[in-house]
């Protein structure tokens, strides 16, 4: 059964929608429970991917890249993917003590929040929540960041600030039921949580980002070196 599906993946190509469980069961003359077991094994082996409410697909190869201070658009382009985004919502808040410390602001300072669904080749890649100090971009409207507009490009062109470095934490998490609908994966699927603080050339904090990224589509390459003996 697994061999049949693997052969089908090679024939249809990466990203192709595979036949449903019933059709596969009839084609292979097996029960649907056998099909489910085979698909579960192929999912664990990263041969196929099962998308919540959308079916089973031949898995695309997720090219690995190092973590650099790049915009999402540039990161996806480097991976050979076509970036886009969709605005989910935006609002303004007053920074509490914790957020103010992260953004190097006084508590109570105004902060713009922009939630976006980030896409790669028209498929969900990440759910992102961007925090921007109003002192950095006083006239920024979160709705300007819809339809794939690059925040980094806008920041440089309009405000003369270029992101040059930052700090990013990465942790493995499981996708919640709510996020599974946005990302098109099953609840409980593995994901990366990226928490990033970025600075401009003057060392000023220009953003704090909390993003949930699909682990099946985003691989990280980390250079390693052997430590020198004392």
Image (tube, grey):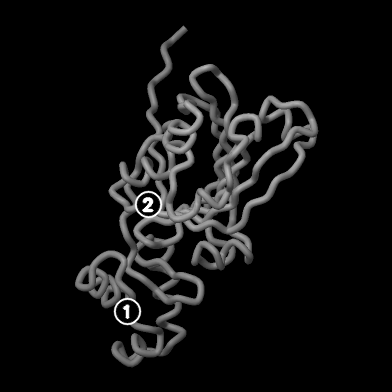
SS of the residue under disc 1: loop
Q: In the image, is residue 111 above or below residue 145?
A: above
For label 2, count other residues whose C-alpha is less than 10 Å away and answer few (under 14), some (14-19) or many (20+): many
Residue 190 — which label? none
Q: Residue furthest front?
A: 139
| Residue 59 position in % (x across, y down) | 34, 63
Gap between marks 2 and 1 measured at Cα: 36 Å
SS class, disc 2: strand
Above-or-below relation of 20 to 54: below
On the rendered image, what quadrant is the N terminus found in?
A: bottom left
Viewer-proximal residue among 190 and 102: 102
* Residue 88, percent from left and from top: 58, 58
Q: Is label 2 in contact with label 1 (beta carbons under 8 Å)? A: no
* Residue beneath disc 1: 1
| Most foreground residue, 179 or 8 | 179
- The residue furthest top is 230
Closer to the camera, 209 or 89?
89
Residue positioned 68% across, 25% down in the render? 104
Q: Is residue 227 above or below residue 23?
A: above
Locate residue 107, reporting x and y percent: 79, 30
Q: Quadrant of residue 48?
A: bottom left
Q: Nearer the viewer, mark 2 or mark 1?
A: 2
Q: How many marks?
A: 2
Please give the residue where the numbered disc 2 appears in the rendered image. Answer: 83
**Image quarter for residue 197?**
top right
């Amino acid at each position: 059964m697994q061999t049949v599906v693997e052969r089908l993946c090679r024939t249809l190509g990466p990203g192709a929608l595979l036949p449903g469980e019933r059709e596969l069961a009839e084609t292979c003359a097996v029960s649907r429970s056998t099909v489910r077991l085979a698909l579960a094994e192929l999912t664990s082996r990263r041969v196929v991917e099962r998308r919540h409410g959308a079916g089973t697909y031949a898995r695309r190869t997720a090219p690995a890249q190092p973590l650099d201070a790049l915009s999402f658009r540039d990161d996806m382009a480097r991976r050979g993917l076509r970036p886009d985004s969709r605005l989910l919502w935006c609002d303004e808040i007053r920074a509490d003590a914790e957020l103010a410390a992260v953004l190097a602001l006084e508590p109570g300072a105004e902060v713009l929040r922009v939630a976006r669904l980030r896409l790669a080749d028209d498929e969900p890649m990440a759910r992102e929540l961007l925090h921007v100090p109003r002192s950095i971009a006083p006239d920024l409207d979160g709705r300007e960041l819809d339809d794939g507009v690059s925040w980094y490009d806008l920041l440089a062109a309009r405000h003369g600030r270029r992101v040059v470095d930052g700090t990013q934490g990465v942790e493995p998490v499981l996708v919640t039921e709510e996020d599974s609908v946005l990302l098109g994966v099953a609840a409980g699927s593995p994901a990366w949580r990226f928490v990033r603080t970025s600075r401009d050339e003057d060392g000023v904090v220009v953003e704090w980002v909390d993003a949930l990224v699909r682990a099946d589509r985003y691989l990280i390459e980390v250079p390693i070196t052997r430590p020198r003996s004392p």
